[in-house]
């Protein structure tokens, strides 16, 4: 049996631990008071006893302070069988404004600390103010901007001694795109007779909501070499932890003007350029045209599609558009590139209509246009036109509509020309090997045809899956478009069509444009063909009404809009 003396000894050892399990007191202190608006204070809360590590809640401070990360530590000591346990929480606080604020009491397991009154004073500036060793300055290049217009935000960190390590957060603004511009700049500057090392960082901020807002200043946290360089620890310099916050900046964001009826593109410089693969045009030979839209002070997503219209005597094979971003003089420069392969189908002289991209000049507050002028081109006949007989029987064995479907969906600009040449080189009345090759060619073309119809069916299903809310144009927009068509001005009709099509998704726009292509070709021929041709405005109006009726049906499907593939 265990003796009573042994049990008593064990209890004497265990009771001190049990007695210290409860929290006996809670104290709260701060490292400085008063504090300047851009300085940080460190709040330390100590609980005597075995407190839970998550017992401290800093959310009560959020209304008056920007609350940094909280660190927690526990310590236990035993002296002469007397045990002492403490739990310590340390939190960095940045005041939000000038004035007197109260850090409330913190209650942990029934014990509370005393509240603390903090006096926050303005940042002392000017020649009469004492020189400060560390501070952050912020500024914007303009405080009044339009929605989605870039403003440049500059942060400067002033350090009177060498920095050992540190981090600088980005500024904060709700409903805005924020990204750093370029690399940090480092230089020295003399301020009120004191020399500083300056670290400068620039940001591009693009507000996504109109109204009055405050950009919250960035927070710097780091370690610098202590002012007294004679004090060292071993071989390492003694460091000092500092925390600073930049001043807030107020801005006003103006909404999109009410008279803007085009894709919103706010900038002070927009340019449209083109590049032709060659200046020589021959029937059946592809020529690539590349358009590049450049804008300053916006992001890639803000660049619109470039609307292009070509005479009906050209087959079009557009490539996927591309975009890129660069930086110059702390400004964003973005480009959108669109390429299309043009294949003339008949010789003659043709007019390529002008290309116009509207944009809003933020300097003048007016709409301007990035424009490519009208271009006249001459298409020469193919070298073998009228001289080489067209292969008859073998070529007729392949269904033309199916091949046309493959070239349209697959984007193969050379398919129409490569196919007859291949057939001519393989067919020989004295070569059984050539006939076998021709059979293999037919099999390959049928496989391509099947693949084309599969892609075609997939596109139809994907378009039908688009919610009907994205497909419905308002009656007012349709009436305005029809009224413009009735007036007969081709330029105005093009602008109205672009505005109307902008209400649809990219896939829908493509299918709608294909469905009204015959009417549009007639319209363009009336304005740009040589000689001009007459066109029936009623046919285009009827096509627009038919599309509107289909897009407003219950299922919102656009599957009937494929007249070119029937």
Image (spheres, rainbow, N blue to C red):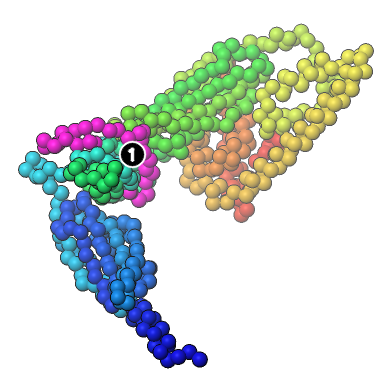
Pinpoint residue 37: horizontal percent, then vertical percent.
19, 52
Give the mark count: 1
Q: Is residue 176 magenta?
A: yes
Q: Quadrant of residue 286?
A: top right
Q: Quadrant of residue 358?
A: top left
Q: Which residue is mark 1?
A: 203
Which quadrant holds the C terminus? top right
Kindly tell me whether residue 471 is visible in this rendering: yes
Kindly tell me whether residue 257 is visible in this rendering: no
Q: Is residue 153 magenta?
A: no
Judging depth in this view, the residue of 404 and 124 nearest the camera is: 124
At label 1, counting other C-alpha atoms closer than 10 Å, the crowd grade (few under 14, some 14-19, many 20 or more) is many
Pinpoint residue 439: horizontal percent, then vertical percent.
87, 25
Q: Is residue 561 above or below residue 24?
A: above
Determine the residue positioned at 18% across, 58% down: 32
* Left or right placement of residue 188 versus residue 272 in this view: left
Determine the residue positioned at 29% across, 48% down: 221
Q: Is residue 303 above or below residue 102?
A: above
Which stretch is magenta? 172-198
Determine the residue positioned at 91% across, 15% down: 431
Determine the residue positioned at 28% across, 36% down: 200
* Left or right placement of residue 461 versus residue 161 in this view: right
Pinpoint residue 529: horizontal percent, then vertical percent.
57, 19
* Left or right placement of residue 454 versus residue 374 in this view: right
């Amino acid at each position: 049996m265990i003796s009573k003396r042994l049990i008593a000894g064990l209890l004497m050892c265990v009771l001190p631990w049990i007695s210290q399990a409860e929290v006996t007191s809670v104290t709260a202190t701060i490292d400085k008071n008063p504090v300047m608006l851009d300085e940080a204070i460190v709040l330390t809360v100590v609980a005597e006893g075995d407190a839970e590590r998550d017992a401290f809640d800093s959310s009560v401070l959020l209304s008056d302070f920007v609350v940094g990360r909280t660190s927690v530590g526990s310590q236990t000591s035993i002296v002469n069988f007397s045990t002492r346990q403490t739990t310590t929480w340390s939190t960095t606080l940045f005041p939000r404004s000038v004035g007197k604020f109260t850090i409330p009491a913190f209650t942990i397991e029934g014990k509370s600390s005393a509240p603390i009154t903090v006096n926050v004073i303005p940042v002392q500036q000017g020649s009469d103010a004492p020189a400060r060793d560390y501070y952050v300055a912020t500024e914007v290049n303009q405080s009044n901007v339009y929605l989605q217009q870039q403003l440049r935000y500059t942060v400067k960190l002033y350090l009177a001694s060498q920095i050992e390590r540190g981090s600088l957060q980005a500024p904060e603004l709700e409903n805005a795109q924020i990204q750093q511009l370029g690399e940090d700049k480092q230089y020295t500057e003399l301020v009120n007779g004191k020399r500083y090392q300056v670290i400068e960082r620039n940001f591009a901020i693009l507000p996504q909501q109109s109204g009055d807002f405050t950009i919250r200043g960035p927070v710097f946290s780091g370690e610098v070499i202590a002012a007294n360089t004679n004090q060292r620890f071993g071989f390492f310099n003694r460091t000092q932890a500092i925390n600073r916050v930049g001043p807030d900046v107020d801005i006003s964001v103006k909404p999109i003007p009410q008279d803007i009826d085009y894709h919103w593109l706010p900038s002070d410089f927009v340019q449209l350029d083109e590049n032709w693969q060659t200046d020589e045009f021959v029937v059946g030979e592809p020529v690539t045209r590349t358009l590049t839209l450049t804008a300053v002070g916006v992001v890639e997503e803000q660049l619109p599609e470039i609307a292009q219209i070509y005479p009906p005597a050209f087959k079009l094979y557009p490539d996927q558009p591309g975009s890129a971003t660069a930086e110059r003089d702390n400004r964003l420069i973005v480009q959108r590139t669109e390429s299309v392969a043009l294949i003339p189908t008949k010789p003659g002289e043709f007019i390529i209509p002008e290309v116009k991209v509207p944009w809003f000049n933020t300097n003048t507050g007016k709409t301007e246009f990035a424009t490519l002028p009208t271009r006249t081109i001459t298409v020469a006949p193919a070298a073998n036109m009228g001289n080489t007989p067209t292969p008859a029987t073998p070529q007729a064995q392949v269904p033309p509509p199916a091949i046309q479907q493959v070239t349209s969906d697959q984007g193969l600009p050379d398919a129409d020309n490569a196919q007859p040449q291949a057939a001519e080189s393989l067919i020989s009345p004295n070569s059984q090997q050539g006939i076998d090759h021709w059979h293999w060619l037919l099999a390959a073309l049928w496989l391509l045809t099947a693949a084309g119809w599969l892609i075609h069916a997939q596109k139809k299903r994907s378009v039908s899956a688009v919610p009907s809310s994205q497909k419905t144009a308002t009656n007012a927009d349709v009436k305005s478009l029809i009224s413009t068509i009735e007036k007969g001005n081709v330029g105005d009709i093009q602008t109205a069509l672009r505005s109307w099509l902008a209400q649809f998704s990219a896939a829908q726009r493509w299918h709608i444009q294909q469905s009204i292509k015959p009417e549009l070709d007639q319209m363009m021929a009336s304005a740009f063909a040589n000689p001009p041709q007459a066109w029936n405005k009623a046919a285009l109006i009827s096509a627009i009404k038919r599309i509107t009726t289909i897009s407003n049906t219950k299922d919102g499907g656009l599957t009937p809009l494929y007249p070119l593939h029937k």
